[in-house]
Amino acid sequence: MRDFRNRSVLITGASSGIGAAMAEEFASRGAALIITGRNEARLEEVKERCIAAGACRVQTAVLDMTSEASIDAFASALQEIPDCLVLNAGISQRSEALETDESVVRKVMETNFFGPVRLTMALADKIKAAEFMNIAVTTSISGLFGFPLRSAYCASKHALFGWYESLQTENSNIRVTFLIPGRINTPISLSALHGDGKAHGQMDPGQQNGMPAEKCARIAVNAIARGRRRKLIGGVELIMAYLKKWAPGIFWMLAGRVSSK
Ligand SMILES: NC(=O)c1ccc[n+]([C@@H]2O[C@H](COP(=O)([O-])OP(=O)(O)OC[C@H]3O[C@@H](n4cnc5c(N)ncnc54)[C@H](OP(=O)(O)O)[C@@H]3O)[C@@H](O)[C@H]2O)c1
């Protein structure tokens, strides 16, 4: 199990939910953190909690994963080679495929797929120079199968598997861990996009009744520390991932009936 004491950990989407909880979990293990997101005030709150939890150092940075300029400026200002890169920022969707404007599909793909890929590319020299680096990618069980009202979201999460698995095959000095959450209690449904681009603005029961973000973060950080390649995290909803793989007939009986809220 890798010890993260005094090791630098860079987390995207650390201002809320799973990312904020992972920051605190790494902090409790004595890591030096670089936490990023768009909301500066929330990042400062997470920073305070990380310091209280035992982080050896915490730096905040405003980073918009949909902006090439923001990613490039952030990457070129970064002095150190992170020991661990956690690509976690993301937004969700709540609209049928045929009712979703292409601009919404692009926004979800920009945030969830092209943003992490651009940041990884911007850090390419540091990744190549690293003796060893953990790269954790927060995908979703929606990256393992299609799901109602999540077409663009599913597409973005599926794409992450393809790109980062390929990256892993080409670089033996990195260990990619795919974090695959099911339903986690975070405000992600509030910012999820409808087909016209408007925010859903509601806390969905799936998240409300989901696994606490702190528990998810503990499991996620343990999986990274152990060098696991994939880690499913959640409750009973994970059964859909197993059914898709081992009993696709039953999966297809249930797929359209699963609550998408
Ligand atoms: N909660 C679940 O049930 C669940 C299940 C499966 C997978 N996931 C995945 O877990 C990850 C974290 O989500 P969460 O549940 O913790 O939701 P959350 O509480 O809404 O957090 C999302 C994070 O992403 C950041 N973010 C969103 N758009 C961004 C952008 N354009 N640039 C930079 N940062 C951006 C947000 O920060 P700012 O607003 O400050 O930018 C925030 O810190 C996501 O990738 C999500 O898809 C969540």
Image (spheres, grey):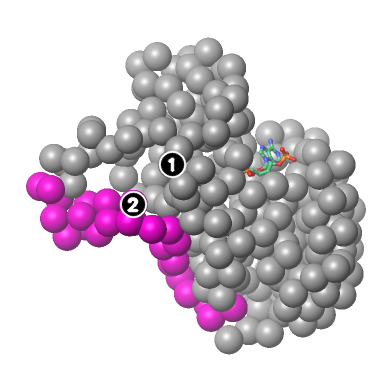
The residue lying at 49 percent from left, 34 percent from top is: 204
Q: Which corner quadrant holds the C terminus? A: top left
204 relative to 52, above or below: above
Residue linked to disc 2: 237
Q: Is residue 233 left or right of residue 176?
A: left
How would you rate the neighbour count of disc 1 (Cα within 10 Å): few for under 14, some for 14-19, many for 20 or more? some
Where in the figure is residue 209, as x and y percent of width and height? 46, 47
Residue 71: name its quadrant. top right
Image point 74% across, 47% down: which residue?
15
Residue position for label 1: 206
Q: Amino acid at mark 1?
A: Gly
Q: Is residue 256 left or right of residue 105?
A: left
Does 101 appear above or below 159?
above
Start-end of magenta stretch: 225-250
Answer yes or no: is residue 69 visible: yes
What is the x, y in percent for residue 103? Answer: 55, 18
Q: Is residue 137 visible?
A: no
**Quarter the N terminus occupies:** bottom right
Mark 2 → mark 1, Cα distance in angstroms: 10 Å
Left or right of residue 62, residue 231 in this image: left
Query: Does ligand 1 reach within 8 Å of label 2's beta carbon?
Result: no
Amino acid carrying label 2: it is Glu
Query: Between 190 and 78, which is closer to the camera in this rendering?
Result: 190
Q: Is disc 2 in contact with disc 1, using a CB cutoff of under 8 Å?
A: yes
The local crowd at label 2, few if under 14, some if 14 to 19, many if 20 or more residues have their Cα within 10 Å, is some
Q: Is residue 216 above or below residue 142?
A: below
Q: Quadrant holding ligand 1?
A: top right
How far from the left and from the top, in percent, is residue 248?
15, 50
Residue at the (39%, 45%) spot, across then down: 142
- Up/down of 70 relative to 175, above or below: above
Q: Which mark is residue 122?
A: none
